[in-house]
Image: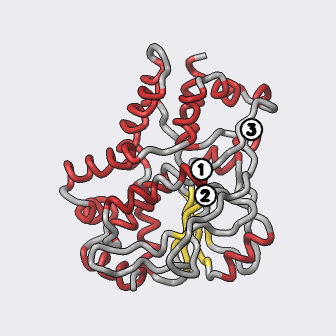
Amino acid sequence: MKRLLVCAAALTLAALPAQAAIARQAAPAAAPAEPSAHQRLLPLEGVQNARDIGGYRTADGRTVKWDVIYRTAELSHLTAHDKALLEARGLRSIHDLRSVDERRDQPTDWTGEGAPAITAFDYSMDMSGFAALFQGEVTADRAREVFAASYPELLKMQRPQQRALFADLLKGEGAVLYHCSAGKDRTGMATALILSALGVPRETILADYELSNQYYRPDLTTAEASDNPQAAAFMRLPEDVRAIFMGVDARYLQAVFDIIDRDYGSVEAYLDQELDVDAADIQRLRSLYTV
């Protein structure tokens, strides 16, 4: 049983190995009012947590451009409408941050003329850190502590993906989309690095990260959980603990910032030393993606 529960703990980082078995695409929540015609939430039919990261003010008074950088959950339910909308917005590149197993279980089916290039790396999720959660009573407070501790390790795990994403953004050749399974953990971390590079204040980045609590809304039921042992184990967890797995908390991302500040001194130094994004590259990113 403990092994199954540890697998269920991976839900927050990788959704479920067969998420479609217990989660259906929920209708997106209404986007909050924006000070322009742009909307934070993309009007996609088959994709959750699909957001434009534009519109945020930088510390030096500039604004992140709309319609060039998108973040989403997995894309296995893309509709013809969704593809047409993204093509019309000039999407040329997708970065799939998911593991081999996730991509196999929920493949992105988008090929043919006009389809964007998809970049992905083969790796397996290491969820060993979640074993500590099940040493004794499983509580919401303990779950939050374990998640916060897992994020710095996730940062290390995602460096190849982050490096490729930044290299692509530096090309400045069209709109770029990146995603994981739920569009909240690995995707949220990538967004934090991008917005930091563009000069967006940290408090704004943390607030953007927590929007996943509003826009990621899987319909978890027990209807088909009996066919998926990991899903069934997850459904037996206390309700408040399940809620922690399906959401985000600014403290998780703050733990990443704390590690970066401690070990590198700044996000800019982290980008330089680990992702090969130097000061000149940061200036290019800001010229490309802020106005």
> Badge 1, how many Cα within 10 Å: few under 14, some, many 20+?
many
Dots 2, 1 in contact, CB < 8 A: yes
Q: Position of residue 2 (x, y in %)?
A: 56, 18
Q: Amino acid at mark 3?
A: Ile
- Residue 182's disc is 1
- For the residue labelled by badge 3, is the local secondary structure a helix, a strand or a loop? loop
Residue depicted at x 69% and y 30%? 231
Please give the name of the residue rendered at 61% of the width and 56% of the height, measured from the top-left corner: 73
Residue type, mark 1 in image? Ala
Q: Is residue 264 visible?
A: yes
Measure the C-alpha gap from mark 3 to mark 2: 17 Å
Q: Which residue is mark 3?
A: 22
Give the x, y percent position of residue 276: 31, 67
Looking at the image, residue 38 sits to the left or right of residue 235; the answer is: left
- Dot placed on the residue nearer the N-terminal end, 3 or 2: 3
What element does badge 1 sit on?
loop
Query: How far apart in space, not on screen, are marks 2 and 1 (Cα)?
Result: 7 Å
Residue 27 percent location from the top left of the image: 73, 56
N-term-proximal mark, 3 vs 1:
3
Q: Earlier in the sequence, mark 2 or mark 1?
A: 2
Task: Describe residue 49's horizontal placement relative to residue 260 as left or right.
Answer: right
Q: Is residue 53 above or below residue 144?
A: below
Task: Give residue 39's quadrant in the image.
Answer: bottom right
Nearest the viewer among 48 and 55 is 55
* Quadrant of the rendering where the N terminus is positioned: top right
